[in-house]
Image (tube, rainbow, N blue to C red):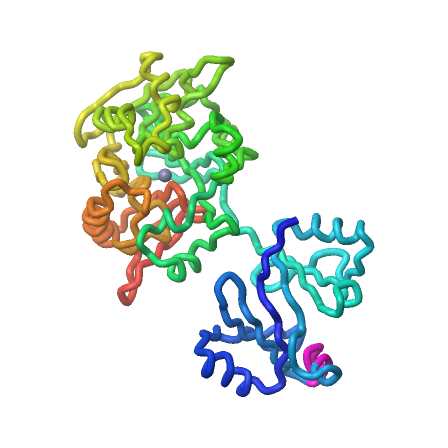
Amino acid sequence: MKAILDHVGIAVTNLDEALALYRDALGLHVEVPEEVASQRVRTHFIPTGQSALELLEPTSEDSVIAQYVEKRGPGLHHITLRVDDIRAALEQLKARGVRLVDEQPRPGAEGALVAFIHPASAHGVLVELKQAAAPAVRLDPRTMAFGDLQLTTLHDGPFRLDGGAMFGVVPRPLWEKKAPPDDRHRIQLAMRPLLVDASWGRMLIDCGVGEKMNAKDRDIYALDRSRTLDDALAAIKLSSESIEIALASHLHWDHFGGATERVGKALKPRFPKAEYIIRSAEWEDATHPHERNRASYLQDDFVPLKDAGVVVFFEGDQEIRPGVRVVRTGGHTGQHQIVFIESGGRTAVFVADMIPTAAHLENAWVMGYDLFPMDTLAFKRRFIREAIDREYLIFFEHDPLIAAGVIREKDGRRYVEQVL
Ligand SMILES: [Zn+2]
């Protein structure tokens, strides 16, 4: 079992005196207090690096904290250890005869699960175990009519990437509130290919990651294959055979790894009836990687497509099918492109890695992965203004919760009004 010190709870009788020490004398930041009505206590968190101090102030005389203070005076009340799997932790403790206050976990603040170990079994210390709420990731396919088209946001399972790399030069205290990192510093992401159903055929924009990744990389990226693109397609009564066109935003593994699959020892196109539409210059870059992008361009993801004769190359920005237009952004990769979908007077845009999640709306929130971040910045600055003014429907490929929405701006602050 791995446990991280989450916080130390300190019972106080006089909050002002406590603040005079922690806030004024030590100069620590004290968060706004939270009232826990059921315990008749007010909590004041003080972040201290990976862990925090929690000042516990009773709000009534019959509060457990008031009783504790009356008996033993103010001071250390409990320590809290964060574990990945609280049920497994409790089982392990029970098996060793440790006395527990809670045999089963119960709900704590912010969706966490908590349970206490009895001080009699912990050398006089009240120990709380806590399993933080997993940031939810929405994986259900969602469909909407869009002019003459039908748009369905699919998924190819959740994964995680390094939070620092996802937010580039933005300091962690700013991004970690929007995208809380796990104990390996990774944030929750989704992979959402977009299905366009039109009179001219069925197009998939990006293909997810597929099944080829080895166990070590699956672990590094927390790749969860319990629900995949096949499940998403099955949920809308389609299969790999249903896809007629596969269009790539760019050829990184988390976007086009799902274009091929392993059949025995051979690598085959994953969608047997599809043509694969790829920008020639992106193909050139992907097949001539350098040290900086080699880990992103995995040759098995796309070379077998050319071998099978199913790739259609094109050059320059253009309409790929009626209502579907690609525009090169550069930035993330030299030839990274986004896809404009226009029908019935409305515009939707699949923005791929230019704006990977709804947390990346500020111009300077550009990924550390980008090869040419200043190009991303320049394109994004112009694009987001246009998207706000014209109320584009934006499809976020990596956002764990918001598949699509409209970017709004109020008092200089940008946010997404979720649609799907
Ligand atoms: Zn990506």
Q: Nearer the viewer, residue 46 or 319?
A: 46
From the viewer's perspective, is 216 left or right of 106? left
State which quadrant residue 277 falls in. top left
State which quadrant residue 283 falls in. top left
Placement of 419 over or under 231, stated as above or below: below
The picture places residue 94, in percent across and down from the top left corner, at 79, 53
Placement of 221 over or under 41, stated as above or below: above
- Count of residue discs: 0
The picture places residue 408, in percent across and down from the top left corner, at 30, 57
Ligand 1 location (quadrant): top left
* Any part of residue 196 in sight: no
Residue visible at 69% across and 79% down in the picture = 63
Q: Which residues are magenta?
A: 61-68
Q: Nearer the viewer, residue 339 or 323?
A: 339
The picture places residue 270, in percent across and down from the top left corner, at 43, 20
From the viewer's perspective, is 231 left or right of 358? right
From the viewer's perspective, is 198 left or right of 41? left
Residue 213 among those drawn in magenta: no
Residue visible at 50% across and 79% down in the picture = 22
Residue visible at 24% across and 51% down in the picture = 384
Residue visible at 58% across and 62% down in the picture = 6
From the viewer's perspective, is 292 left or right of 115? left
